[in-house]
Image (cartoon, rainbow, N blue to C red):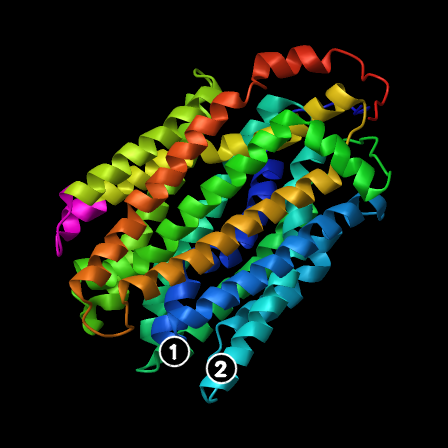
Amino acid sequence: MPHTSSPKLSVLEKIGFGAGDAAVNVVISSMMLIIGYFYTDVFGLKPEDLVWLFLVVRILDGVIDPAIGWLNDRVRTRWGRYRPYFLFVSIPLAISTILMFTTPDLDYRGKLIWAYATYITNTVMFSLVTVPYISLIGVLTNDPQQRLSANGYRLFFAKVAGFCVAIVVPVLAKEWGGGNLAHGYQLAMALMAVSGVALFWFCFFTTTERVEHREELAPVGRQLAHLVRNDQWVVLMAVCVLGTIGYVIRGQTAAYYAKYYLGGGNEQLAEGLIAKFMGTGVFAAILAMVASTWITKFWCKISLFRWTQIGTAVASAAMFALVKPGQVELALVLYFIVCFVVDLHAPVFWSIIPEAVDYGAHKTGVRVSGLAIGLIAFFQSLGLAIAGSGANKLLDHFGYVANQPQSPAALAGIVLMLTVIPGVFHFLVGAVMFRYRVTDRFYHTMMQQPLPAPTDR
């Protein structure tokens, strides 16, 4: 059981916590929004090769994440369990991000090897800061409302970082490239990477690990057995995979949709239209963070989670049916709605993960935190692997050819990948969440009860 009090978090600490996720999202937004387009249309790789690249990297990431969570449970420094990673790993992460967006003067095979090496390195560095960051909210406070509020700040700043990646990077790449778009992307992402280091350090110096938990240090197999018996954690794992697939397929398709479906493949307009379209989506997500924090003061956060995901499926279907090629204004309006509705759930998801961990402790008598958080990152990586590989497999299937006029089949496929396909996954998320029952009232009642004796079967 936690044995320290849960004071109200200061605004500065919430901002500092949010700054950490802004730093995380400099990388993850580039993975969700830009990396696929960069690799095909700028770096020069074929979609069929990206299928394997994304799959291999994400499988590796899935192995690393639980190991880091396991390590977090066992290693404590004078700065805490989680914060030191922000201080010491942020610089290697920045360097690896710059290298990932560097286009070397090599033949195709050499470029492919470079892409594997830099993407894998970046993924390892990313996991070393992301798993501790996800865990941090559980030791800042054990008050559910404070966690929800802090996650509102966190996701607001995360979306601001995503906004910068979506809008600033394509624009700066064109301006700074001087006719060399590859060099422009390298410089623009270098700016983002250096900003990420500053944000991680700000998070380190403004947050405090004040809540202590008794962690289960049993063998991994025993911890996994307890996690599997935590039915609410299992629900969140399913939600994490399904939601990530929908989110990433839509995000990775946005640049192609803007360039080819709305802009007709016009190279002069491409980067500006991509920035406008993706920026609209991220701006909607920023507003959703603010709105979600306000709405959950009056409406059950779990109900909000369920119905916004089902609403996303409806809005996606409407965008598929109504937007025709070249209808930029209508597309922007409907894409804004889709992205606003889908992201209303985001602060809720990240705030209820520690509550699901506490639920498991009260069900089995054993609190498994580090591995639980690490496996969340694993399932997010699994979703990224399926979505990243699947998106490129779909592009190849529909006949997409980079920097060429697209066939009707390719355009139709791009539209499906932005709307209907992710909409189906979000509908499934909403349906699965009807099996989640740890509301605020349930949680407060549960936490007033003592932990039971550990049970093993």
In the depicted structure, whether residue 379 falls above or below residue 392: above
Is residue 123 shown left or right of residue 322?
A: right
Mark 1 burial class by Cα count in 10 Å: few <14, some 14-19, many 20+: some
Q: Position of residue 225 (x, y in %)?
A: 76, 34
Q: Nearer the viewer, residue 290 or 306?
A: 306
In the depicted structure, whether residue 450 falls above or below residue 286: above
**Residue located 84% across and 45% down the image:** 74
First to last magenta residue range: 322-332
> What residue would you read off at disc 2?
111
Is residue 226 shown left or right of residue 15?
A: right
Find out whether residue 273 is within the magenta segment. Answer: no
Label located before the other in sequence (2 or 1): 1
**Residue located 36% across and 47% down the image:** 282
Q: Tell me the kind of residue under disc 1.
A: Gly
Find out whether residue 331 is within the magenta segment. Answer: yes
How far separated are the C-alphas under marks 2 and 1? 8 Å
Is residue 190 shown left or right of residue 356?
A: left
User: Is any atom of residue 9 visible in this view?
Assistant: no
Classify mark 1: helix, strand or loop: loop
Q: Position of residue 19 (x, y in %)?
A: 56, 47
> What residue would you read off at disc 1?
44
